[in-house]
């Protein structure tokens, strides 16, 4: 299983993702592909994302049963803790 969620993605990238994956909600794409195809799709996200942000989640033989990677600016930062990937939050910016 593969899930990609994009925010503020250009229409061109969203169209390209829709060629390979099913868009089940705005910006949320799902499918089931080999590692090679998954990497090819992620390369397209990297090349076409612009100022947006994205996360890709896939089934993996880990303790949690999945793995993920992110791209672009976001308050949520993936980090590893005791061999398990978790998400840390950056502090919220205060208005100056």
Image: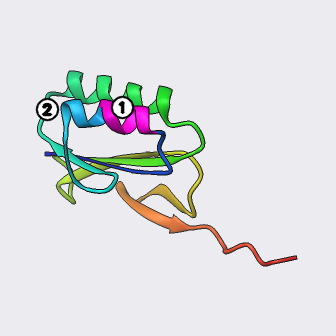
* Horizontal and vertical percent position of residue 54: 44, 47
The image quadrant of residue 35 is top left
Q: Which residues are magenta?
A: 11-16
**Magenta stretch prevailing secondary structure:** helix
Q: Is residue 46 visible?
A: yes
| Identity of the residue furthest to the right in this view | 96
Q: Which mark is residue 61?
A: none
* Horizontal and vertical percent position of residue 85: 37, 56
Work out whether residue 52 or residue 80 is closer to the camera in this orientation and state it.
Answer: 52
For numbered disc 2, what is the local secondary structure?
loop
Work out whether residue 56 or residue 6 is closer to the camera in this orientation and state it.
Answer: 6
The image quadrant of residue 69 is top left
For numbered disc 1, what is the local secondary structure?
helix
Q: Is residue 58 visible?
A: no
- Above or below: residue 41 compared with residue 65: above
* Horizontal relation, residue 58 to residue 4: left or right: left
* Horizontal relation, residue 21 to residue 10: left or right: left
* Horizontal relation, residue 34 to residue 10: left or right: left
Does label 1 or label 2 sit earlier along the sequence? Answer: 2
* Horizontal and vertical percent position of residue 4: 30, 46
Residue 61 forms part of the magenta stretch: no
Instruction: Locate the C terminus by quadrant.
Output: bottom right
- Above or below: residue 49 compared with residue 81: above
What residue lies at 73% left-to-right and 72% top-to-bottom?
A: 93
What residue lies at 22% left-to-right and 21% top-to-bottom?
A: 36
The residue where tag 2 is placed is 33
The residue where tag 1 is placed is 42
Instruction: Locate the N terminus by quadrant.
Output: top left
What residue lies at 25% left-to-right and 30% top-to-bottom?
A: 38
- Above or below: residue 75 compared with residue 96: above
Other residues around mark 1 within 10 Å, as few (<14) / some (14–19) / many (≥20)? some
Q: How is the image coloured?
A: rainbow
């Amino acid at each position: 299983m593969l899930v990609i969620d994009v925010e503020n993605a250009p229409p061109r990238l969203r169209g390209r993702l829709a060629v390979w994956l099913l868009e089940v909600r705005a910006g949320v794409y799902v499918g089931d592909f080999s590692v090679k195809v998954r990497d090819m799709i992620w390369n397209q996200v990297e090349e076409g994302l612009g100022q947006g942000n994205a996360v890709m989640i896939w089934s993996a033989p880990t303790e949690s049963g999945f793995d993920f990677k992110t791209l672009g600016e976001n308050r949520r930062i993936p980090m590893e803790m005791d061999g398990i990937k978790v998400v840390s939050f950056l502090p919220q910016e205060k208005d100056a």
